[in-house]
Amino acid sequence: MLTINLIREKKDFIIERLKVKNFEAEEIISKILLLDSSRREIQTKTDMMQGELNRISKEIGTLMKEGKETEAKAAKERTYKLKEDIKSLSDKLIPVENDLRNEIIQLPNLPHESVNPGHGADDNVKVREGGKIPLIPDTALPHWDLIKKYDIIDFEMGIKLTGAGFPVYKGKGAKLERALISFFLDEGEKAGYTEVLPPIMVNEDSGFGTGQLPDKEGQMYHATLDNFYLIPTAEVPVTNIYRDVILNGDDLPVKNIAYTPCFRREAGSWGAHVRGLNRLHQFDKVEIVRIAHPDHSYESLDEMVSHVEGLVKKLALPYRIMRLCGGDMSFTSSLTYDFEVWSAAQKRWLEVSSVSNFEAFQANRLKCRFKDKGDKQTRLAHTLNGSALALPRIVAAILENNQTESGIKVPDVLVPYTGFVLIN
RNA sequence: GGAGAGAUGGCAGAGUGGUCGAAUGCGGCGGUCUCGAAAACCGUUGUCCCGCAAUCGCGGGACCGGGGGUUCGAAUCCCCCUCUCUCCGCCA
C-alpha cells in the first residue's frame, strides 16, 4: 500500500512509474485525492466540535462540584445540538475512509528505477549466469520418469491420499528432500539468519499484511470453519511477525529464515509445462526474510541475491539471474530477481527463487516501523524476501542433470545430509 | 467441550463515572558525581490523525483487547466478539 503522503505529493511521478507495470493510475489517483481532501475536511470539523464538547463537559463537571445546578443544566442544553452534529458528521467519515482505503489498496507498488517496462517473461533482463550446462545423452529421462524408475516420488499415491499435485516422497526421495531443507537452513544460519518455524495457517490480518488478501484469495486454500488460510509461502507468517511492531533502528536489518511447506491452489495455471515437479499444490521451501532500514534495503537485496547464488553454485546447478520487467513483477514488489536453473532433460530453465524488495509497500500495510536513535518520528521499514530455495524444481534439476548409467549422483554438499552418494 | 476469572503504557501493576494519557515500581534515554564504571540523586519517557509553523515546535482530536451502546462526560456502567489464564473432560 502506497502512503497517502506520497500520493498527495508525487501524483504525477506515481502515474509515470506505474506505467512501467502497465498500470493506468490516473483515474484512481484523482479519486483518492478527492476522497482524501474530503476526509481531512470532515476530520478537521469533527475534531473542532469534539474539542468544544469536551470543554463544555469539563465545565459541567466543575459546576456540579460547586453545586451550581442551574448553570450546569444550561451548559447541558448547549451540548445536545453539538452532539447531534458530531454524530452526523462522523457518520459521513466512515464511508469516506473506507472508500479511500479501497482505492489506495488497488495501487500496485512502484517499480524501482532500474526496472524495465515490459509485458512478460521475454522482457526480463539477464543479469548474470553461471554453472555449466551438462551434456547428457538423448536417452536421458525427464524427472517424472526418473522418479518412477527409482521409486522416490509417487504422484499416484498422492492422488489417492489427497489429489493431483500432492506427491508422496519415498525412501531416498524423502531423504533428499530433508537433506536439501537442512542444507538450506544451515547455509542461512551461517549467513546470519535466525531460524523460525512458523504456523502454516494464518488469519485474515496476516493475509492482508503481506498483500495476499483481499485480491488473491483464490490462490490460497481457505479453512472456512475457522477462517484460516494455508500459507502460499513462509513470507506470510514470517513477515507478519513484524506487523504492528516498532523496531529499533540499530536492530536493522532483521534477518529470518524459515522452512515451511507451501500451499497453492494454482487455479487456472495448469498447462503444457507443468508436468511432474514443475508445479505442485504442496511443496517445500526455505525462505529468507529481512526487515531493513530504508536507506540500506538495496544493499540487503544484493546480499540476498548473493546468498541464493551461493546456494545454486554449491549445488553445482547451471543458473541464470533475471531482473524482472515491470509487467512480470508482482503487485507488491519494487524490484525482483528471479533465479532459474537448467533442467537438462526438459531442456528448460526452471524458476527456483524470487528475491524481492517491497520497500515500504508491505510495511505500510503491516504497520512495520522503526525508530532511529535520537529520532522522535517513526518511519516505515522496508521488507524483503526471497526463496532460498524452493525445493521441487531444484530436485527436478538435480535428478535430470546428474543422471548416469548407474544412478543419480547426489551433489557433494548434500552427501553429509543424505548419507548416500547415489540414488539407484 | 463444560464452569469460573481476566485483558490497562516496553514489562509488572493501581485505578470502578468528571483536570486519567492514566498512580507506583522496573526498564529505557539524558544529566550530576567518577579516571572510568556501579550505586545514589535529578530530569525525561507511547502511538495515530487533523491544523498552524512548514526544521526544533505549538494547538486540537483519538487510542486502557476489538466493535457497538448509556451519559453533558466512560479505562471505569451495559451488550456483542476475540483472546488469555485456572479447574474439569478429552487428547498427540
Image: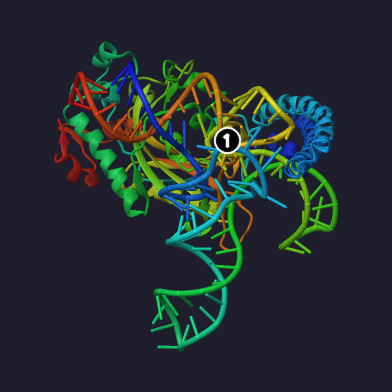
Q: Is residue A371 left or right of residue A230?
A: right
Point out the image quarter for the C terminus of chain A: top left
The quarter of the picture where residue A97 lies is: top right
Residue B4 at x, y = what percent? 37, 26
Q: Is residue A203 left or right of residue A150?
A: right
Camera-nearest residue between B71 and A373: B71
Against A381, residue B35 (above or below) is: below
The quarter of the picture where residue A78 lies is: top right
Q: Is residue A10 visible?
A: no
Camera-nearest residue between A358 and A370: A370
Q: What number of labels is visible?
A: 1
Residue under numbered circle 1: A332
Point out the image quarter for the N terminus of chain A: top right
Kind of residue indicated by mark 1? Thr
For the point 30% across and 14% down, the residue is: A162
Report helix, strand or loop for mark 1.
loop
Q: Tag 1, which chain? A: A
Residue A224 at x, y = what percent? 44, 16
For the point 79% across and 24% down, the residue is: A88
Against A266, residue A362 (above or below) is: below
Residue B21 at x, y = what percent? 64, 49
For the point 47% across and 40% down, the residue is: A239
Residue A379 at x, y = what percent? 61, 51
- The residue furthest front is A67
Q: Is residue A270 visible?
A: yes
Camera-nearest residue between A225 and A77: A77
**Colour mode?**
rainbow
- Circle 1 Cα neighbour tier, 10 Å, few/some/many (<14 / 14–19 / ≥20): many
The quarter of the picture where residue A200 lies is: top left
